[in-house]
Image: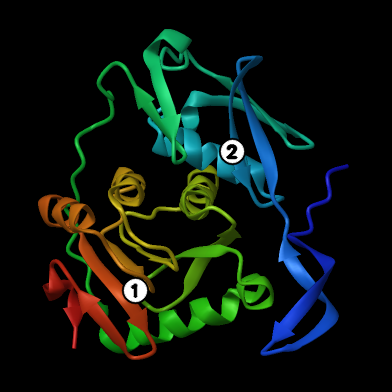
Amino acid sequence: MLNDKKGIQVELFKVTGIEQKRISDLVARETVAKIYINQKYFTSLNCSPGGFKYLATGFLYNSGIIDNRDKIISTEVKGNKIFFELKNNLLIKEKNINTYQNNQIILNKPNRQKKYSIDNCISINIDTIYSLIYQMQEKSVFFKESGAVHSCGIADTNGSIILFSEDIGRYNTVDRVIGKALLKDIKINDKIILTSCRITSGIMKKILKANIPIIISRAAVTDEAIKQAKKNGLTLIGFARGERMNIYTYAERIII
């Protein structure tokens, strides 16, 4: 059975100034999740152990391989291998796949998913955001212990975090929470996504695919992420720490 522990203790030398001492410290474990579709090997994801079904499902959804959970006939996890049986999926043919990078499938043919659009008028109180930022910090236990993982959560406008994940890969954390929402049939197009990671165009594409209208990050955002948020009606917040933040787009959703 695969060990699902997120970290292991290692011996190391800690140096402070000119003083050196031998200590034991926690480091994050890294493993590989291997995805099989209709009995054929598809791709591998470098990730943290455990929760492979949610990670792989979110990855397939965010990559446009599936567009809803009804396309999944069955899922079976054996160790670090995830086996999917999918209905009539043409995108998995090797000739349609150009390359794989940053946990995204790049297709030779145009992606057939619907054009990104967010038509959602939800709003959230600024104090609720501050509360969610604090809750995320409290939930990020393994980050506090190792400093080696990213975290991601999905929350409602009442201030409750309903889904949460940690992983060594920032793309993986988004895939994990969206995959779990998909398999558990949790509506997320009226929710908020919170993350510890830098928001780039690649992260934005995953979030836009799920039609989540508000994204809040503790880290920075890129100019391309801002352009995508503005174009698609997404409220984008960065550097959300303590009781401060930068609102880059559609600030009218934030009630102050």
**Which residue lies at the image location 61% right of the left edge and 42% below the top edge?**
46
The image quarter containing residue 112 is top left
**Which residue lies at the image location 59% right of the left edge and 57% below the top edge?**
167
| Depth check, front residue: 255 or 65 | 65
The image quarter containing residue 244 is bottom left
The image quarter containing residue 199 is bottom left
Mark 1, Cα crowd under 10 Å, few <14 / some 14-19 / many 20+, is some
Residue extending farthest to the right is 1
Tell me if residue 92 can be seen.
yes
Which is more foreground, mark 2 or mark 1?
2
Q: Which residue is mark 1?
A: 157
Question: Which comes sooner in the sequence, label 2 or label 1?
Answer: 2
Q: Is residue 191 above or below residue 243?
A: above
Quarter of the picture containing the N terminus is top right
- Secondary structure, mark 2, is strand
- Secondary structure, mark 1, is loop
Where is residue 158 drawn, in percent x and y? 38, 78
* Callout count: 2
| Depth check, front residue: 64 or 242 | 242
- For badge 2, the amino acid type reads Leu
Coloration mode = rainbow
Q: Is residue 227 above or below residue 192?
A: above
Mark 2, Cα crowd under 10 Å, few <14 / some 14-19 / many 20+, is some
Q: Is residue 128 above or below residue 67?
A: below
Q: Which residue is mark 2?
A: 45
- For badge 1, the amino acid type reads Thr
**Which residue lies at the image location 31% right of the left edge and 55% below the top edge?**
212
Where is residue 157 drawn, in percent x and y? 34, 73
Tell me if residue 68 can be seen.
no
Where is residue 79 drawn, in percent x and y? 79, 37
Q: Is residue 103 above or below residue 22?
A: above
Where is residue 8 drawn, in percent x and y? 81, 63
